[in-house]
Image (cartoon, rainbow, N blue to C red):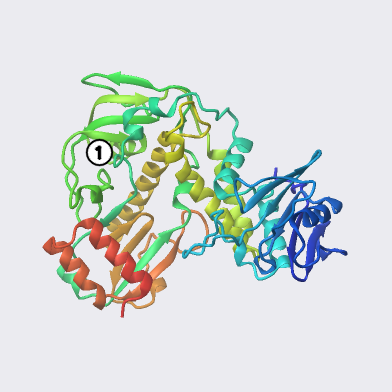
Amino acid sequence: MITRPKRRVGVLDPKGLWAAEDAIIQRVSNPPAPGAALGEVLDVAAAYGLSQLWIHPSWGAVEGDAGAWAVDAKYPEWLVCRRERRTIPLVQPGLDVNPAGLSAAGTTWHRAPDAATLLEQLMRFGEAVGETFFRHPVPMGAKLIRNMATVSVSGTVKPKDFPKPALASGNVDAFKWIRPLTADEQSKAYIHGYDKNAMFLGACSSLNLGLGEPEHLIGEDIRWTGLPGYYFADISREAPVRLPNPFAPAAAHWGDEMPIGPRWYAAPTIELALKLGYDAAISEAYVWPEHRRVLEPWYRLLRDARASLKGQHANIALTALKQTYSQTIGWLDSSKQREKEEPQDLFRPDWRHAIIAQANANLYRKARGVWINTEQAPVAVGTDCLYYVSDIQDPRIACPAGIALGEGLGDFKIKASESLSSHRSIFQAVKDRTLTIAEGLSQLQSALKTGGD
């Protein structure tokens, strides 16, 4: 059950200090004067019982004498200020905004036009997840994992002691694929991209993940038992007709095609192969005998929060939520954590790989199902986006049967829709091998982002 956060948050801009009382946003009396020093601002925040004070970018940076407050400035955008027994984070979301529009804290809270709007969005976020936003999407997401987990997620394995396939690059990656157009496809007029909503979050819904320490198995005939982990296997396969190879989604690492032969796979990929009727000869494995659907409660919380925010005027809060789950999943294999000598909470490259592999498997099943039922095949796949060509200009009407357009998890949204004419040369270059798969896909995606003709 989600409860409203008990922390009282305030936001300061040139028009005054804004706080909420019983969910009603109002401007409080006697706000800090413009240009007030850090200590004065904090004294006012303490007087009003604030547990967080956000500074809207229109106020400018809060600087100067901290007075009686001790300030931890490890994160300039999130100053931790202490006086006696009181701690107040002073948050400046407009610091160091990069060209991509993200602040130093990796968020877009600074886009709120004024303090009242920023406070409203912060409240909506807090009500959706049951927690006041905390510093950065990653620690926010990690905090929610700990809150929701039904088992301990404390680290037990040193980063350097994880299985080799967990630490190697290229074993598990999202789809990066493009193929030459067929003669019939060459004549099509338009290209449309359909992006799967929250694909990686959705993969967490019923995914078994390892706990404790892994077991190393070596042998000529290791049986598949469904345990989470890594499997060194030789999957007998033929390249799917007009579909990406689900057993080589990271082909871009090798240029055009991944070398044929045994390699490491995460468990969801082995499961996909067996369900498709392929043989998978496993000769080595690292498996976790103890396992749970660790992230399922976290998934449910964020799924429901996403749905709740979708139904409100809460675009800034919704963006922060999306940043929270996407960046947290990436952080499970953080390079900074890899350097640590002791076990790290939520350093779980195996979890991240399992999530990616499950998401890949889900997306492949969708594309394969569409192909079987409609004979429409994607011409490119970029992570969570399927690209199709069509003679129909309207991407909604052109959308292949089996791909549901909507707002929910598992649904798709329209990501790109343009004339194919200015992009045919990219597909031809892939056919002529003057562009690799990686280069061709990158050029296509860049061209579609900036607009074709």
Judge whether 209 appears above or below 24 on screen: above
**In the visual, does 387 lie left or right of 187?**
right
Which quarter of the rendering shows the C terminus?
bottom left
Furthest-left residue in this view? 432
**Residue 158, image x and y in percent?**
44, 25
Which quarter of the rendering shows the N terminus?
top right
Q: How many marks?
A: 1
Judge whether 270 appears above or below 23 on screen: above
Of residue 298 and residue 374, the one placed in the foreground of this image is: 298
**In the visual, does 230 lie left or right of 436?**
right
Judge whether 95 appears above or below 251 on screen: below
**In the visual, does 45 lie left or right of 144?**
right
Mark 1: secondary structure: loop
Q: Amino acid at mark 1?
A: Gly
Mark 1 Cα-neighbour bin, 10 Å: few <14, some 14–19, many ≥20: few
Q: Quadrant of residue 429?
A: bottom left
**Residue 133, image x and y in percent?**
65, 50
Can you see residue 378?
no
**Residue 372, image x and y in percent?**
27, 55
**Residue 391, image x and y in percent?**
28, 76
Instruction: Please report the residue visible at 35 percent of the width from the left and 34 percent of the height from the top.
Output: 167
Q: Quadrant of residue 306?
A: bottom right
Instruction: Please report the residue visible at 16 percent of the width from the left and 40 percent of the height from the top.
Output: 260
Disc 1 target residue: 277
